[in-house]
Amino acid sequence: MKVKKYIAPSMQEAMKKIRSEMGNEAVILNSKVIQSGGFLGLFAKKKIEVIAALDQELDVPVHPKGKEEQPFFQEKLVHPITSNGGLNSKEQIQSPISEENNLHLAEQIKELKDMLQSIATNDKSELYPEPLKAILQKMTKQEINPSLKGQIMAELLAYWYQMNGNLTNNQLQEKEKELFAQKLKNISFGGISYQRKYINVVGPTGVGKTTTLAKLAAECVLQKNKKVAFITTDTFRIAAIDQLKTYAKILDVPIEVCYSLDDFKEAKKKLDGYDFIFIDTAGRNFLESQYVKDLQSIIDFNEEMETFLVLAATAKMADMLAIYERFSILPIKRLIITKLDETSTRGSLFEVMMKTNKGIAYTTHGQNVPDDIEVTTRDRIIEQILR
């Protein structure tokens, strides 16, 4: 592999030099604006410094004047076959490469990849071709984690030069979605499986658990035509009980209020004939560890139950992770994200999913019941975040 530094008045001129000397297979590793010339810091001219690389094992380009070019970072670019960086005969080149040299070449490639990602993490838009600037700005605005953003931009940058810049904006956006989808490929999405009788929602105060539960129950009644009932353990707020009673009356379904584990077991017996039981829990300060322990003393989580953790899209990423950590002692199946309509920055959702390894079951975007809720798929959440 050959790496060389070019300095030119503009990016276009630098690209001409690179294509002329290294061909269309060259990859841009770095570019930055530098000051050149002048006197005592005055009258200096801006130029572009570009570092380009060419994956080339069998030959080294010769300068038009007949002198071999000296590669940038030459001390690191030892030819994989020879120890002095020179070229052996064709027969020697075609001979098997030793394991040691293979490891050395792999280290070089890793260094270059790390360099490319480090470059891509930089938010300076002048480092990127014009079509990639809009994508970078969008991810920055969405507050995508810098490390994740760097990985995506590195892949997009490599893809851009691999295709010689012959890409439309739509093609770049599709590639961006594809890269994000790959990051989430091992995470499952989707709503209630309807394989378990009890559907439970937990979460901190103020995230909209009760309204969300009512939306889920309404979907089950109106679309699935099932017999449902409510159980609430939210005895800390009279208003919450009254709210759920109102939803129960509208849907014409029974509701049981539970203050203890014995109450919960008795409610289960009363509602045994119903297809699905939707359980509402109290909203408390998630920083209080006793809250989750109280839930365990009231609800039997060992039953056939699907438990969803409700988080607000308006919350800070650090708080969402702290909330998940607090509730992780419970068998959380997936996340429900509320208040999606109340924020324009949603990048934190990517990091929450990747760090918790939990997909999103539903997103909500308003207070209307049974509307303003949507089952989530991998492609749909990517679209909602990157829109």
Image: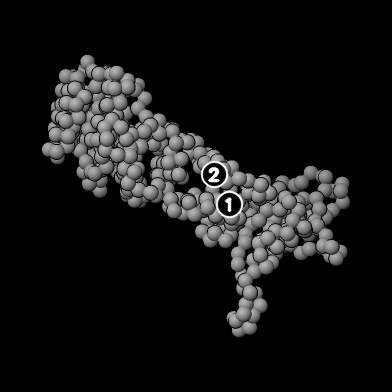
Q: Which amino acid does the dot numbered 1 rest on? A: Pro
Q: Are marks 1 and 2 in contact (CB under 8 Å)?
A: no
Q: Say whether residue 147 is visible.
A: no
Q: Which residue is mark 1?
A: 131
Q: Residue at 84% of width from left, 53% of height from top?
A: 88
Where is residue 109? Give x, y as percent. Answer: 66, 51
- Element at label 2: helix
Pick the residue in front: 79 or 99.
Answer: 79
Q: Which amino acid does the dot numbered 2 rest on? A: Gln
Q: Residue at 21% of width from left, 17% of height from top?
A: 272
Q: How many marks?
A: 2
- Element at label 1: helix
Is 345 above or below relative to 39?
A: above
For marks 1 and 2, give the CA distance. Answer: 10 Å
Q: Quadrant of the N terminus?
A: bottom right
Q: Residue at 64% of width from left, 69% of height from top?
A: 47
Q: Say whether residue 40 is visible.
A: yes
Is 220 above or below relative to 353?
A: above
Q: Quadrant of residue 261?
A: top left
* Residue located farthest toward the bottom when viewing the structure as drawn: 40
**Mark 1 or mark 2: which comes first in sequence?**
1
Q: Which mark is residue 166?
A: none
Where is residue 334? Give x, y as percent. Answer: 36, 34
Q: Residue at 40% of width from left, 44% of height from top?
A: 349
Instruction: Please state if 26 lies on the left or on the right of 128 as rendered.
Output: right
Is 23 above or below relative to 189?
A: below
* Residue located farthest toward the top when viewing the structure as drawn: 273
Q: Quadrant of residue 227?
A: top left
Q: Quadrant of the C terminus?
A: top left
Q: Which residue is mark 2?
A: 173
